[in-house]
Amino acid sequence: MNFTVLISQMLQATLMTLRIFFITLIFSLPLGLLVAAGRMAKTRAVSLPVRFYILLMRGTPLMLQLLFLFYGMKPIFGIQPDRVRAAEIAFVLNYAAYFAEIFRGGIEGIPRGQREAARVLGFSRRQTFFRIVLPQVVKHILPPMSNEFITLVKDTSLAQVIGVAELLKITSDWVSSAVSMVPFAVAGVFYLIMNAAVTRCFTAAEKHYGYYR
Amino acid sequence: MKKIFSFLLAAVLALSASGCAGKQAGTSPARDVSWQKVQSSGQLVLGLDKAFPPMGFVDTKTGDLVGFDLDMAHEACSRLKIKLKLQPIDWKNQTAELNNGNVDCLWNGLSKTPKRAEEMNLSIPYMKNNQILLVKSDSSCKGLSSLAGKSVGVQSGSSAETALNEEENADFKNSLREVVGIDDYSKAVMEIQNGTVDAIAIDEVVARYYLTKNPGAYKDLQDQEGKDVSLAVEDYVVGFRKNDSALKEKIEGALKAMAKDGTASKISQKWFGKDVITIEK
């Protein structure tokens, strides 16, 4: 087994993994905020479809969503998205739902008394949200968010079911040819390094927000 | 509750309406422009499972995609003056990938089966294949009947899986404790070594690859006379979309030329040490 070639191919595949990771975060975080707002809306015409969307995304396997978005679009709607694009869309839609619920939990967790106090002190609704509520929300949702980020790094391997050349599939093909498990161990190290970096970032963020400790 | 129901109903109706529209557009009769399309794009997109040695797999020295089928395809494409583009796919989704246009052909130890003949446009055969069974090297099993009550693994979406489900193998299949669908053959041979399945049904060519790579780890199941047990004898063909006859005929033309002038035989010698080509000349 030529390890140099193996590592270089795995590094290339890691770029795809990272691409899915960052694109998903860039789009699903704002979308999640929007969905959370919709979920908390008072009008049922808004909150009901949003609740259905969240149920659909969290209630069906991500693998199924990937397969549907890549193989199901042509026969039903006549459009065929590109492999990586289909993967990105599936991941963004899926993770936005999970983030929405985390955001909602954080926002609803701020005691009503804070909002009342802010009103008494003369804060506008907008000032209250951005100056009082949001900073506390960020602090509180850091642990569940770290879960989602780490899960996302690992979930990228699901994209292989629609033929995306991500890290685990490349590793798997080498294992097939070499009849050896060693590439899997190397892939494990790759994933560990990525998730160690994510964990590091969150630890630093929690420290930054731990001003009362 | 009523609101949710009517919303769902509207969504389902809208989906099925657009589905109908799509189908109608597809069934209007059209000239067969499959070869022209490939020729003008300058490339043939070949769909393969790249964990299928020796037909299409990763060379662990160079990291390149190599294999008997790939060599044949490269040669055919250069004769037709087009490039070959390799598109690794998940073998389970082979039909969807082909029919959606993501790949132009399936050329990866594709066995001819009645179901595939219905769903795709299959070429003339180029090689014969045997579905054999691999067992652990210290196994005392001899013949199909000795596998009664045992577990057999197959690759999901493979013709070995189809062969097991055929009428003539019904008694055999019913005698088994379970049939396990496995992702790819490297995992399947690992399952034999670990003992999580007792045998795997596998293409003979792939079995030979693993037998040479890992001598002594497993062996082919033989019957009382020492002959390899065979679940099915099949032809390897190239698969195209149902309407792409023009493209298929061009590729077949190249294959026939390769058989005539001995190029196919040379490629066969390189990979199998003998001439296994069955292309009618």
Image: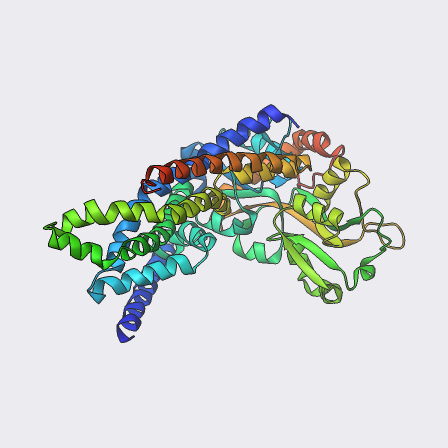
Q: Position of residue A9 (x, y in %)?
A: 54, 29
Left or right: B5, with B261 as reference point: left
Q: Nearer the viewer, residue B109 or A19?
A: A19
What's the residue at 51%, 51% (across, down)? B95
Query: From the viewer's perspective, is residue B246 above or below residue B72?
Result: below
What's the residue at 73%, 59% (across, down)? B151
Write down the quadrant of residue A169 in the picture. top right
Q: Nearer the viewer, residue B93 or B84?
A: B93
- Which residue is outermost to the front? A213
- Which residue is outermost to the bottom? B2
Q: Position of residue A98 (x, y in %)?
A: 37, 53
Write down the quadrant of residue A43 in the picture. bottom left
In the rendered image, is residue B256 in sight?
no
- Quarter of the image for the N terminus of chain B: give it: bottom left
Q: Nearer the viewer, residue B237 or A211?
A: A211
In the rendered image, is residue B117 in sight?
yes
Q: Position of residue B251 (x, y in %)?
A: 55, 38
What's the residue at 48%, 36% (across, down)? A196
- Which residue is outermost to the top? A4
What's the residue at 66%, 38% (across, down)? A181
Badge count: 0
Q: Position of residue A15 (x, y in %)?
A: 45, 32
Write down the quadrant of residue A55 in the picture. bottom left
Left or right: A116, with B42 as reference point: left
